[in-house]
Amino acid sequence: MAWEIVIGLETHAQLSTESKMFSGASTAFGAPPNVQASAVDIALPGVLPVANRGAVERALRFGLAVGAQINRRSTFARKNYFYPDLPKGYQISQYDLPLVLGGSLAFETSEGPVTIAITRAHLEEDTARLVHRRLDDGRDVSLVDYNRSGTPLMEIVTDPVVRTAEQARRYAEELRLLLVTIGASDAALENGQMRVEANVSLRRPGAAAFGTRVEVKNMNSFRSVERAVAFEIERQAKALDAGEPLIQETRGWDDDRGVT
């Protein structure tokens, strides 16, 4: 091939605790909007977040399952940004000292066995959920449901060692199987309990530097992961072959149209 494919995957898995990452509010799925958001979840003045022991235990269980290094000391930080689904202005997440470092996940593909190295797994809180609707008068609106806000998340990041769209799909499938087997997450993609993002870039074979990276979000099925990555590889290859510059950007996956 004229281009070497470089893919790194980020997976957010909601952990199967009955309460949230830093509060005692329920994490039960399917409740009416905005009935499961406590003062801690929406960061009202004076609240005190307290880490969920069960979430920490599930992250440790994952780290042991993939042969990772468990850090005996880890820290949480405020990741500051503003978006409608996080109006408090920051997300509590782990950054420089995550709970889990390293590890790997092995699986079979049509081209033989593959082992994908894992960079890290860290704990954080989920954001609220945006619901986009068109009203009877024709206006498009976005509504915010805070039930999901504060749900414990484990973000699992791979090294940039995935090489094909099939490998991306098989990794996601095996990761979900592992999470369910060890009781860390229900990982129901249709309920948003597991969400996959792919960072895709191309470079000349043998090149040391990475190419321009494009992050693909909004993949909520294994089929979508494979299709989205395959489309992005083809799109980038055509652009590079034509001498067109790529820009680092975030793209969504449109499953109906089959495009990023």
Image (tube, helix red, strand yellow):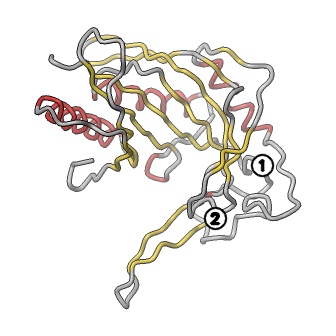
What is the total number of numbered labels drawn onto the structure image? 2
Residue lying furthest top: 206
**What amino acid is at disc 1?**
Phe
> Which residue ends up furthest to the bottom in the rendered image?
137
Direction from residue 51 to residue 157 in the image, left or right: left
Q: Residue at x 62, y 15 (%)?
A: 68
Q: Position of residue 11 (x, y in %)?
A: 50, 36
Q: Residue at x 38, y 89 (%)?
A: 136
Residue 251 placement (x, y as % from top left): 34, 47
Q: Which residue is rendered at x = 63% and y = 19% of the image?
A: 101
Q: Can the viewer see residue 30 in this picture?
A: yes
Q: Which residue is mark 2?
A: 146
Report the amino acid beneath label 2: Tyr
Residue with the mark numbered 1: 22
**In the image as oriented, which residue stretches furthest toward the left?**
242
Of residues 194 and 178, the one drawn nearer to the viewer in this rendering? 194
